[in-house]
Structure formats: structure tokens, C-alpha cells
Amino acid sequence: MTNPLQFLQQTRGEIAKITWPGRREVMLTSVMVFILAVVAAAFFFLVDFLIRTGLTAILSGF
């Protein structure tokens, strides 16, 4: 078990190792997330539309 002062020193040392992403990397990953969200929304819209159309066709037969 380490004392609190040693813990804080180790924590500061670990935080110093962090490399933050640059502006270009943040923008690129943000655009990728937005595009993936649009693709996922379109996919689920299409699946929902096909299921709704199929069920409407089946139920209109009765």
C-alpha cells in the first residue's frame, strides 16, 4: 500500500503520458461518427419500412 503523496506522484506521472488528439484527428473521427450514425439510421429506416410494408400486405389479405 502506497502513501497518498506517492499515489499523487504516480498519478501525475501517468497523466503526463497521455497524448491528446489533434484538431484534425478530432474532426476526422467526428465526421466518421456522424456518417456512421446516418448509415445506421438509414438501415433501420429501411428495415422498419420493409417489415411495415410486409405486415400491411399480409394483414390486408384478411
Image (cartoon, helix red, strand yellow):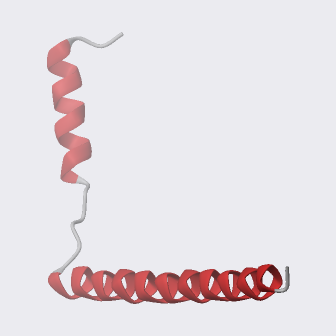
The image quarter containing residue 26 is: bottom left
Q: Is residue 50 left or right of residue 11?
A: right
Q: Quadrant of the N terminus?
A: top left
The image quarter containing residue 20 is: bottom left
Residue 7, image x and y in percent? 23, 23
Q: Is residue 52 left or right of residue 32?
A: right
Q: Residue at x 34, y 84 (%)?
A: 34
- 28 or 19, which is in the foreground? 28
Residue 39, image x and y in percent? 49, 89
Residue at far front of view: 62
Q: Quadrant of the C terminus?
A: bottom right
Query: Does residue 17 lie above or below 59 as drawn?
Result: above
Q: Is residue 16 left or right of residue 35?
A: left
Q: Residue at x 14, y 18 (%)?
A: 5
- 57 or 26, which is in the foreground? 57
Query: Does residue 34 lie above or below 11 as drawn?
Result: below
Q: Residue at x 40, y 89 (%)?
A: 35
Q: Residue at x 79, y 79 (%)?
A: 59
Residue 13, image x and y in percent? 21, 42
- 39 or 14, which is in the foreground? 39
